[in-house]
Image (cartoon, rainbow, N blue to C red):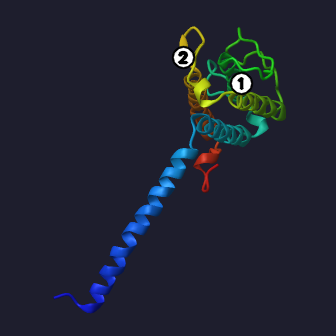
Amino acid sequence: MMAPERRCAMKIFARMVPVVTFVLLGLGHAAAQSATVSGDLLTDWQQQKRSMMAIAEAMPEATFAFKPTEAQRTYAEQILHIAGANVYLMQHLGGVAVAPDVDTTDFTVFGLSATSKAAVLEALGAGYDYGIAVLQEFSDEQLLETVAGPRYLGDVTRVKMAYFTLSHAMDIYGQMAVYLRLNDVTPPASRRGGV
């Protein structure tokens, strides 16, 4: 035989289960309806811009010319490489946004010649802003259309081209984190509170 307090608790629980289930299903359905490929991609791009601007800003200007070995890019060149690559790669989406001027025959820094920390950060921001402008031009359906990528990728969907661009930048981000550590600087994402 069940104690009266336990029976009362069981009745309340039994009444609450359908209500909680209904609310949770409704929230899941609303979230599923509001998520879009274009929205997710734009959010990821904007988040990466914040992360890249933070890591670029983290290195003191006095060590922007630092490179771990002679064969590698300087810290500033790593940033300019991302800025230029973002423009070069996102141009393959076929948008109408006006792109910053880059030299597509120079895959080191894409012809970007900024030298001061402020100018390097400005170039990086412009590369990401161009990507934002391009992404805002396309619907979910258009992002799934095939475009001609660089010859090493061939024909790809616009969404693959955009995510390839994001992944390329994250590869360089990882290298930049090592550059910071070699200069006794903790990368922003590794600090308490993160980016």
Q: Nearer the viewer, residue 17 or 43?
A: 17
**145 versus 58 height, above or below:** above
Identify the residue at horizontal 64%, vertical 47% (top origin). 188
Q: Residues within 10 Å of mark 1 (few under 14, many from 20)?
A: many
Report helix, strand or loop for mark 2: strand
Picture disc at residue 77? 1
- Horizontally, residue 19 falls left or right of residue 70, namely left
Picture disc at residue 156? 2
Give the image location of residue 11, x and y in percent.
32, 80
- Horizontally, residue 164 falls left or right of residue 57, namely left
Quarter of the image that includes the N terminus: bottom left
Q: Is residue 150 visible?
A: yes
Q: Nearer the viewer, residue 25 or 174?
A: 25
**90 versus 18 height, above or below:** above
Q: Amino acid at mark 1?
A: Glu
**125 versus 28 height, above or below:** above
> Which marked residue is nearer to the observer: mark 2 or mark 1?
2
Q: Nearer the viewer, residue 143 or 19?
A: 19
Kindly indicate the quadrant of the structure image that contains residue 35. Answer: top right
Q: Earlier in the sequence, mark 2 or mark 1?
A: 1
Q: Amino acid at mark 2?
A: Val
Report helix, strand or loop for mark 1: helix
Q: Is residue 153 visible?
A: no
Give the image location of residue 120, x and y in percent.
79, 30
Kindly indicate the quadrant of the structure image that contains residue 183. Answer: top right
Q: Nearer the viewer, residue 141 or 168?
A: 141
